[in-house]
Image (cartoon, rainbow, N blue to C red):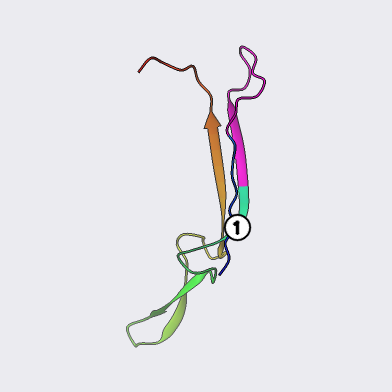
Amino acid sequence: MSKERRVIEIVPGRITPGGRMTERVESRGHSCPYCQGNGFHWQEDDWQERYKKECPICNGSGMLDAVITVEWKASGNF
């Protein structure tokens, strides 16, 4: 099974005083690892009848999106 690997290079761009100090990067369309992209899990009720239960991680879509937020701030002396 192949995997896609992306690299995000974090470098401050042009920033002005009072300007925006955050950046947002989105990566969409990743298969949900909890349900393997099905959007559901098989369950059994009290009478051992099988039914599909919606995945609680992807809410039944089978896909996940990643949102990465970078906040720039002044460096402190640690």
Percent of width and height locating residue 10? 57, 33
Residue occupying the point 60% across, 49% down? 6
Q: How many marks?
A: 1
Pick out the residue farthest to the left.
46
Q: Which image quadrant for residue 53?
A: bottom left
Q: Quadrant of the C terminus?
A: top left
**Image side of residue 2 versus residue 45, left or right:** right
Give how far across and how far down residue 26 sits, in percent.
62, 45
The correct choice, above or below, for 4 with respect to 21 in the image is: below
Q: Is residue 37 above or below residue 14?
A: below
Residue type beneath disc 1: Glu
Q: Which residue is labeled 1 in the image?
A: 4
Residue sitting nearer the eye, 54 or 1: 1
Q: In the rendered view, would you say 74 is above or below 35?
A: above
Q: Is residue 29 left or right of residue 77?
A: right
Asked whether 73 falls inside the magenta stretch, the response is no
Residue at the image point whose x is 45% and y is 65% from the top: 34
Considering every residue shown, the one lying at the far top of the view is 17
Q: Which residues are magenta?
A: 10-26
Magenta span: predominant SS is loop
Classify residue 62 by image quadrant. Answer: bottom right
